[in-house]
Image (cartoon, rainbow, N blue to C red):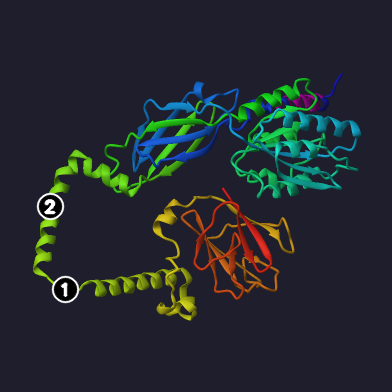
Amino acid sequence: MISDSRVRTMRYAVLLTLILFFSPLWAQKSPFIVEDKDSSSYPSIQLFIRDKKQFPLERENFLIRESKGSETRTVLRPKVLRKEGNRPIHSVFLIQSGTSLEENNFNTRFLQKVIQSSGEEDHFSFIFFSDDLLVVEKDLDRQTALSKARVPGSLSNYNTGANLDLVFQKLNTTLTKESYLSLLVSDSEYKLPPGLRQGLSTSGLPIQVIGKRNFSNLELVRIYGGEFYDIDSTDLISKFLTDFEYFHKYSAEIRYNSPFQNDFWKGEVDFIRVDWESSRGGKFTYTYKPGIIKQLRFVLLSPEVFLPTIGFLLVLTLIGLLLLFRKENVDLDEPGEEQRKFQARGEEREVYQRMYGDQFHSSPYANPEGVHVSRSLPVSELEFEAAEVYDLATLIQKEGRSPGKQVPIRKAETTLGNGELSDVVVSDPGVNKQHARIRKIKNRFVLYDLISDGGTYLNGKKILRPRILYDFDEISLGKTVYVFRAR
């Protein structure tokens, strides 16, 4: 007879096998990705969504709601359009070099067939990696890519997880929203590094994984979306090329008229939130605000305010004409100009005092005459409201003493510097003890320079005022460079 413990072990093994084989069916990420949004032609709104061949948006059931304040309205009769023809794309292949000639020949043939089936205007980038090599080829045209599509051999692949972590760090400057990202893994068993499990390594792009059916490969597809292609399948190439060809099609466009178009000006909130949800689990939210000219036009043409507004404008016009005739040869330009300059300086002083605290009085900005015209206000209200909203943020050291080191930003204020009291200690002689600071304000992250000796640089440019951070921004302090990642 079989013991109870052995029976339980066998049941657990069967259950684990079922989870491994059927996980793509229930854990698959949404097949829809929002590529762009356009509200410049309000009340007409456009959403550009990337779909898959198996789930074309033209046959998808979805619901769109708009909310303004506490009121929510459903969008009626949205249209799904798609531009004819194909678009050029940027194909990015991450290929693990195998340890056998047969394996590398198969990967080479696969890569060449994909390039041969691509469009004439397509571009390609390759990253070949293993324990003992890392070869990067960026932005190649079709002909050059075909000549360089040779998978080199390697000696070992014992550290696949760590190698993948390094490879994905090099993707920051390579990926665009037109990129088609594919990963070909030869290793049949490896563990994902913690960095890849956060889902922040591809700028929101899905990953097409070609390899053995194992937990790590399926987990990559679950976290980042995309498709899994079994390298042992007989129809691997035909299935991959079918999806690759469909990606060349233009994104589906959803166009609709805002249900708030006739009375959006009512209430105190002028931002409109859009919630899009499909029957297959696709869901996203974003906000927009009609332009000032659009708002004025709709307000003036609204029946409820048209006559009162016209009457008010007529009264103001009559008052202006009376003042013009009564006050002749009175030069009001110069005093008015001086008053505006004084107010601008006062507003700037107040903003810098609130942002920098007591340091303002000892800084070069304490003299209002020293503030040049080229220095705009630190963060305007419109810039702040239009900035990306993030819940989590992490600093990843790109250049310096500890490349790849990740520091999560959890506090409302995070100080960077070469001192023991700094939240992020930067071991760099060119960095002050308190060099820069990142503040989290209403889920926006703002970078401040603490009047350092060498200055703080954002994306290669020295910041002269506080700047709002966006995903993939590069922060330079001395010779140390951090990549700001957020979601």
Q: Nearer the viewer, mark 2 or mark 1?
A: 1
Residue closest to the eye, 21 or 138: 138
Q: What's drawn in magenta, residue-wise?
A: 7-20
Q: Quadrant of the N terminus?
A: top right
Q: Decide which of tag 2 and tag 1 comes sooner along the chain.
A: 2
Any mark on residue 314, and which?
A: 2
Tell me the tag on residue 486.
none
Q: Residue at x 45, y 30 (%)?
A: 254
Q: Which residue is found at the position 24% from the left and 44% from the top?
A: 299
| Residue 130 sits in quarter | top right
Image spot of residue 193 (x, y percent): 74, 46
**Left or right side of 8 for 40:** left
Disc 1 is placed on an element classified as loop
Name the amino acid, label 2.
Leu
Residue 351 to residue 87: above or below: below
Q: Which residue is mark 1?
A: 330
Q: Name the amino acid, label 1.
A: Val
Question: Residue 246's x, y, as percent?
Answer: 62, 26
> Magenta includes 151?
no
- Residue, x 86% and y 40% (percent of image)? 152
Is residue 12 rendered magenta in the image? yes
Residue 274 position by quadrant: top left
**Residue 266 seen in the figure:** no
